[in-house]
Image (cartoon, grey):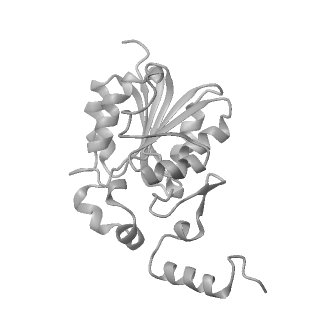
Amino acid sequence: MQCSYGNAATLEAMIARRVMGEPLAWITGVSMFCGLKINVDRDVYVPRWQSETLARRASERLPHQGTAIDLCTGSGAIAKTLLTKRPLSRVVASDLDHRAVRCAESNGVDVYEGDLFATLPRDLKGSVDVIVGVVPYVPTHSLSMLPRDTFAFESFLSYDGGEDGTDVIRRVVASSPRFLRPGGALLLELGGDQAEFIQDDLRKWDFEEVQVFADDDGDVRGIEATFATSR
């Protein structure tokens, strides 16, 4: 019987890579996310099923002809999910890593290379309905405790969130009001007690109706907050 990946030698090489801990998505070149097949190039952050809750909530907040920004998009999995569920919407994304940018483009995402909001189109300011992101949020001291395939293969750039894991999260909270319309939503992945750590930041930057949500395993997975309708 012919091997779907070419031949026995190719299959054996793929198995060897997996045994060494290399992420399966890098070996096959694809990953499933929210029922979608996502291209995942080698050295690009692999989308996790735990982030699907974030993507679903973001799509629920996005109007059918709305506008969304996906920060630290990686392969573009969340942006592609938004585009699939809201095909008439405008979804733009950003990432620091040029490899991620190319990968997201292969998934049909309108993506800009740069730090968070820095390179996004200026016409987005004050008009965005949803800002969403899986930004780095692992505390620096916890990086060594990540799973083997994460620790050995994926870049710490995708994970390192500083001392308590909220360095990048706080930057996003502070910058989002320049882009969100009143009543727009900010949704960010986080963990542990980080939602409590950023409560003062959210209040300072006029966010209200803050909800902490969990993934399908019941673990804290993110926050959803609404930009104040009157300022």
Q: Residue at x 40, y 12 (%)?
A: 230
| Residue 68 screen position, x and y as percent | 53, 31
State whether residue 207 is above or below residue 38. above
Q: Position of residue 194 (x, y in %)?
A: 31, 46
Q: Residue at x 30, y 68 (%)?
A: 145
Q: Nearer the viewer, residue 145 or 118?
A: 118
Q: Residue at x 29, y 37 (%)?
A: 170
* Image vertical order of residue 129 relative to residue 82, above or below: above
Task: Say above or below: 9 vs 171.
Answer: below
| x and y, in percent, of residue 100 in the image | 47, 52
Using the rendered image of the protein, determine whether residue 50 is visible from the camera's viewpoint.
Answer: yes
Q: Position of residue 223 (x, y in %)?
A: 42, 40
Comparing 27 with 81, the one in front is 27
Q: Quadrant of the C terminus?
A: top left
Residue under the point 28% across and 68% down: 144
Query: Looking at the image, how many numbered discs can be counted on the residues?
Result: 0
